[in-house]
């Protein structure tokens, strides 16, 4: 974990120097809270709370190519088990602008990520390494602000997961689902602030 923190510091330091030199830095990300309450037919109620903090910092290499680093921490607690899971992830990324129509542009974003998930109920830790590629749409509101919509209904991904003991899994996914174009699970809106 100490090595990861050193790498985060080095990348942040390099991006800060780049900001001073060219003023091409941007920041964005997401923050969220989730609370769910479900009552079954017997009248038993199950509650779940969760939150996510996922900032990202990036640098415009030129008009079409950006690089950056995203960090995420999420926590979910469910009283049905009780289940308590914390996840930390780090994901360097690159974005390429494929098409531009005035203020609207379509990008292809690729992330290489590492995630560590700690299941406190079962005292298990899972690590995952992966690659995901997905399109996103960006609408420029001003020189400083843009709205970004991640279009997860079309994606490509590969992941290797290892858990306690010898448990390992490998997954590959490729999908384009026209039936889920406006599914809120597959459609996320965020923002970017350009410095």
Image: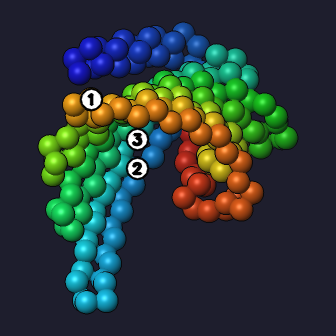
Residue 157 at x, y percent in the picture = 57, 35
* Residue for point 60% across, 24% down: 94
Q: How far apart are marks 3 and 1 (CA)?
A: 30 Å
Label 2: which secondary element: strand
Q: Residue furthest right?
A: 101
Q: How many marks?
A: 3
The one of 86 and 27 positioned closer to us in this rendering: 86
Dot 3 or dot 1: first in sequence order is 3
The foreground one among 174 and 170 is 170
Residue at image location 54% in from the left, 58% down from the top: 185
Q: Nearer the viewer, residue 57 or 40?
A: 40
Quarter of the image where the N terminus is located? top left
* 192 up-or-down from 111: above or below: below
Pick out the residue farthest to the front.
166
Residue 71 lies in what quarter of the image?
top left
Crowd class of label 2 (few under 14; some 14 to 19; many from 20; radius 10 Å): few
Viewer can see residue 75: yes
Pointer 1 with pointer 2, Cβ within 8 A: no
Callout 3–callout 2 Cβ contact below 8 Å: yes
- Residue 58 lies, in percent from the top left, at 53, 25
Would you say 171 lies left or right of 117 here?
right
SS type, badge 1 = loop
| 25 on left or right of 167 | right
Q: In this view, does 128 lie to the left or right of 144?
A: left
Label 1 sits on residue: 166
Q: Mark number for residue 32?
A: none
Q: Which of 7 and 156 is in front in this view?
A: 156
Disc marking residue 31: 2
Picture quadrant of residue 117: top left
Between marks 3 and 1 in the image, the one whose residue lies nearer the viewer? 1
**Residue bearing the label numbered 3:** 54
């Amino acid at each position: 974990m100490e090595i990861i923190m050193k790498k985060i510091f080095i990348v942040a330091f390099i991006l800060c120097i780049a900001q001073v030199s060219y003023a091409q830095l941007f920041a964005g990300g997401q923050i969220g809270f989730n609370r769910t309450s479900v009552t079954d037919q017997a009248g038993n109620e199950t509650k779940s709370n969760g939150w996510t903090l996922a900032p990202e910092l990036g640098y415009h290499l030129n008009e079409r190519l950006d690089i950056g680093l995203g960090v995420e921490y999420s926590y979910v607690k469910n009283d049905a088990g009780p289940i308590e899971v914390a996840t930390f992830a780090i994901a360097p990324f690159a974005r390429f602008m494929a098409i531009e129509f005035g203020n609207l542009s379509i990008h292809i974003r690729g992330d290489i990520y590492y995630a560590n998930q700690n299941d406190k109920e079962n005292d298990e830790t899972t690590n995952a390494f992966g690659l995901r590629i997905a399109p996103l749409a960006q609408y420029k509101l001003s020189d400083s602000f843009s709205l970004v919509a991640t279009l997860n209904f079309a994606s490509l991904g590969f992941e290797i997961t290892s858990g306690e003991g010898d448990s390992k899994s490998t997954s590959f996914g490729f999908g384009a689902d026209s039936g889920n174009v406006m599914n809120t699970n597959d459609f996320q809106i965020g923002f970017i602030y350009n410095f």
